[in-house]
Image (tube, helix red, strand yellow):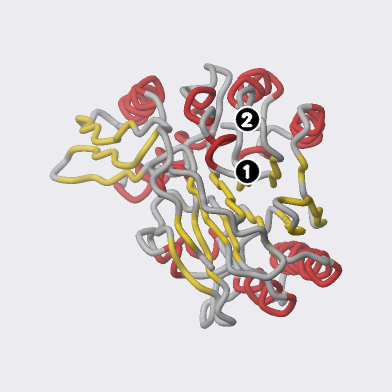
Amino acid sequence: MEPEYLLSHLREQLAREAGELGIEVELVEGRLLLCGVVSTSERRTLAERIAYAMGDGHEVVNEIRVVPPVGAEAPERLS
Amino acid sequence: MIRVAAVGDLHVGADGPAGWRDALAPVSDEADLLLLAGDLTRVGAPEELPSLMEALSRVAIPTFAVLGNHDHHSGFAREVVAQLRQRGVVVLEGEARVLRVNGARVGVAGTKGFGGGFAGACGSEFGEPEMKAFIAHTRGLADRLSAALHELDADLRLALLHYAPVEQTLAGERPGVYPFLGSQLLAEAVDAARADLIVHGHAHDGSERGVTPGGIPVRNVAQPVIRSAYRVYCFSGRDAFDCAPAPAP
C-alpha cells in the first residue's frame, strides 16, 4: 500500500477505534513513528496495537507521551 | 479579584476518570469558577458518563461547560448535557449565564464553535450544499455567541469555546488542519460584542496564548497544551470588584 494511504487509514482507525485525533503518524525509514500525547499508558498501548494491526508489516516506534492531569501552575494575572 | 480556572480536552473514557478526580480537587480552593472547554469525554458514549461524573466529583465551585466534537461522536450529546446539568454544571450552547463572585457580576457565554479557517484560508458558503452547511453551522454558532454576549450584563465577560477563534493558539499544529480546528468567525463574533477573555480547547498540539484582532486575550486550555489539570486566570483592578489579595496558589 502506498505510504500516503497507509498513514491516512491508520489515522482514521486511531480516531474510530481509540477516539484519538491528536496522534501524529509518520513513516520514517520504513518504520511507523507514533507521536503525540495521551493521558494514560493504556491509551498509549492501544494506539501502538492499532498501528501494528494496520501497519502493513512495518515496525512501530511508539513515541507517544503519557501526560496525566496534574495540579495547576501559578495563576496568570490578566487585569 | 476574580480567579477563573479553565481546562479542556479531558477525554474521560469508560476506563475511568484517569486521575482527573484528584487532579481537579484543589481547583475549588484556587479559583472562583471553572470553565470546561469541551471534549470532556473520549467518544461521547453513555458508558463514559459515570467516569466523567467521578472526575468532577470533587469540584465544588460553579462550573460552566461547552461540548466538543468528541462529546458528539456517539450521537448521545443530549445525554452528556443532561448528565452534566444534573451534576450542576451549566452547559452553554449559545447562551450566557451570570454569577456573582466577590460582589462582581461574572458573565460566561459559550458555544462549541466549529471549523472554517482563518484569514486568507477561510471556507465560504458557496458551492455544494455540504460546503454551505459546514460554514453555515459555524456562522450560526458564532452569531448565537455574539447575541449572547451582546445581551450579557456583567463586569467580567468570558467567552467559552471548544474550537479555536484565532490562528496563534494553533501554532504547533499542521497548518493543513487549521480549517478543522477553528474559525475566524468566532473571533469576529466576540470582538463585535467584547469580552475580557476567550478560552478554548481542541488543538492538542497548539499553543496556549493568542489574541483576537480586536485585542481580546485567547487561551488554549487543552490539557495536552497546558500540561496540567487546569489554568487559573486572575482579574482585578476594577471598581466593581472586591480586590482582596489572592490566596497563594
Q: Chain of mark 2?
A: B
Whether residue B127 is situated above or below residue B235 in the rendered picture: below
Residue B59 found in image quarter: top right
Q: Residue A16: horizontal and vertical position, in percent?
A: 54, 33
- Front-most of residues B164 and B123: B164
- Measured Cα–Cα span from mark 1 to mark 2: 9 Å
The local crowd at label 1, few if under 14, some if 14 to 19, many if 20 or more residues have their Cα within 10 Å, is: many
Q: Residue at image x 81%, y 28%?
A: B86
Number of the label disc, if any, that sits on residue B59: 2
- Front-most of residues A38 and B213: B213
Q: Amino acid under label 2?
A: Val
In the rendered image, which residue does mark 1 sit on?
Answer: B34
Circles 1 and 2: CB atoms closer than 8 Å: yes
- Front-most of residues A78 and B185: A78
Secondary-structure class at tag 2: loop
Q: Amino acid under label 1?
A: Leu
Whether residue B227 is situated above or below residue B56 in the rendered picture: below
Q: Is residue B107 visible?
A: no
Secondary-structure class at tag 1: strand
Q: Residue B194: horizontal and vertical position, in percent?
A: 70, 75
Q: Residue at image x 59%, y 35%?
A: B28
Whether residue B43 is situated above or below residue B99 in the rendered picture: above
